Image (cartoon, grey):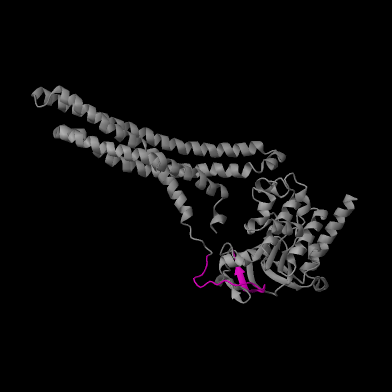
Amino acid sequence: GFYDRMSSARIMTRVTDDVGRVQWFLTWGTQTLITSSLQIIGIGIIIFSMNLYLALFALMPIPIIIIGVPLFRKRAHKAYHKVWRRWADVSSLLWDTIPGIIVVKTFTQEKFELKRLVERMSHLVAANLKVTLLHIKFFPLLGFAISSGTAIVWWVGGQEVLRGNITFGSLVAFISYMGMFYGPVQTISNLFEPLQSSITSSERILEIMQVEPEIKDAPDAVEFQFKGSIVFKNVSFGYNPYLPVLSNINLEIRPGEKIGIVGPSGSGKTTLTKLLLRFYDPTEGAIYIDGVDLRKIKLQCLRSQIGLVLQDPLLFYGSIAYNIAYGKPDATPEEIIAAAKAANVHEFAMNQPLAYDTNVGDRGWRLSGGERQRVSIARAIITEPKILILDEATSSVDTLTERKIQEAMENLAKGRTTIIIAHRLSTLQNVDRIVVMDKGRIVEVGTHEELMKAGGLYSQLYKAQFAEEATVSVVQR
């Protein structure tokens, strides 16, 4: 999708910097442009009424301006695009580095990151220098053309005074009006830089605004209450058409059934859930909920009835209550507290300085990993989803926290079709079936006992993990 291809920093640069440039020109540049244009028209009428012959000489620089401006604009357009691309490169680096400053310092990579920043800044300076050189070439020529026009009028006007056709006072008055005429022309020419900058920024903003959603509702899309049946039928998919991530997936999940999905990293587990949420459509085959093709279900209907708890939960800047109620903004305080209790959030929330009104900080940094995870579970509980996806929700927490999260997930999964993507196979003890994936294919399906007896990939993964945990336990002792 679009957000997979473009970095967050580049998008934010367009949303903030580019919008700011357009706003400035619309607020101040347009006002100056209109005022100066009216002055040019008004004073132009005056100088033509004063002396038609001199007025023709006075306008001699205009053709040079008319020819020169489009040439300048064409070259400046490319130069400004390059400047904004270089600026996006710098922003992208800072966007990555500043939040990860602890990692940078831990690995003593300050000099490396500084070198990268200096390199990108040098590219930005070089791009800006090209724009400056364009201005140095164009604007002095423009000023020279205007000054030449004034000199020509002095010469021709002086000849007219000597012949007695006009008085010296009339010539001085005409020259004064001519200066008033070219003053606004000079002002408008000074707007070329912000105008070109604004035009370039507008194009970059429109590029985002005009992106057509790759996933959208079909004209005949329907809405209905899910019961929870899910069927993957001959599903294949790849982010790149030439590199399939999933191949010929066939799986049927009954309403209310708890399914565990396991497999090595890169086997396609998370991609399977992205297709179910319809972040992408299969390249082959189809997915059905209660017998209806996902592509025939309205996106709002689909996603509002699927709860998602991620391995690394994202919390928004705001209170604990705000984050719990994010999926249901009209939730009552009673509903928020009920969801919090079910997710084991209530106890630690009440120990915070402002209880549920405590701000979690940017991306929830004021909470521990386990606390963030439980808030995300409460966020899923409050929406009362019919289908639940738990994507390795306990893979990065300690054993005690895992138990609390596990209890919260058990409360969340009651009566719901549940898909659990697990790294720790011990978390799949209470599932109805386990689906084993490898290299984008389903290679085994069964209960824990059946798969252990079969001695396939699941058995190998389980024994390897059990041996690893046993080794860690011995080391800790």
**Number of numbered markers:** 0
Residue sitting at 79 percent across and 61 percent down? 407
The N terminus: image quadrant: bottom right
Q: Which residues are magenta?
A: 216-238
In this view of the protein, which residue sits in the foreground, 124 or 202? 202
In this view of the protein, which residue sits in the foreground, 55 or 237? 55
Q: Position of residue 404 (x, y in %)?
A: 80, 57
Judge whether residue 299 is colored magenta.
no
In this view of the protein, which residue sits in the foreground, 7 or 405? 405
Dominant secondary structure of the magenta stretch? loop
> To which quarter of the image does residue 23 belong?
top left
Q: Residue furthest bottom?
A: 291
> To which quarter of the image does residue 184 belong?
top left
Residue sitting at 60 percent across and 37 percent down? 115
In this view of the protein, which residue sits in the foreground, 295 or 443? 295
Residue sitting at 36 percent across and 35 percent down? 190
Judge whether residue 219 is colored magenta.
yes
User: Is 186 drawn above or below residue 477 in the view shown?
Assistant: above
> To which quarter of the image does residue 339 belong?
bottom right
**For residue 405, side relative to residue 155 (left or right):** right
Q: Position of residue 209 (x, y in %)?
A: 47, 54
Q: Position of residue 364 (x, y in %)?
A: 68, 48
Residue sitting at 51 percent across and 73 percent down? 220
**For residue 176, side relative to residue 388 (left or right):** left
Is residue 267 visible in this depiction of the protein? no
Is residue 134 visible in this depiction of the protein? yes
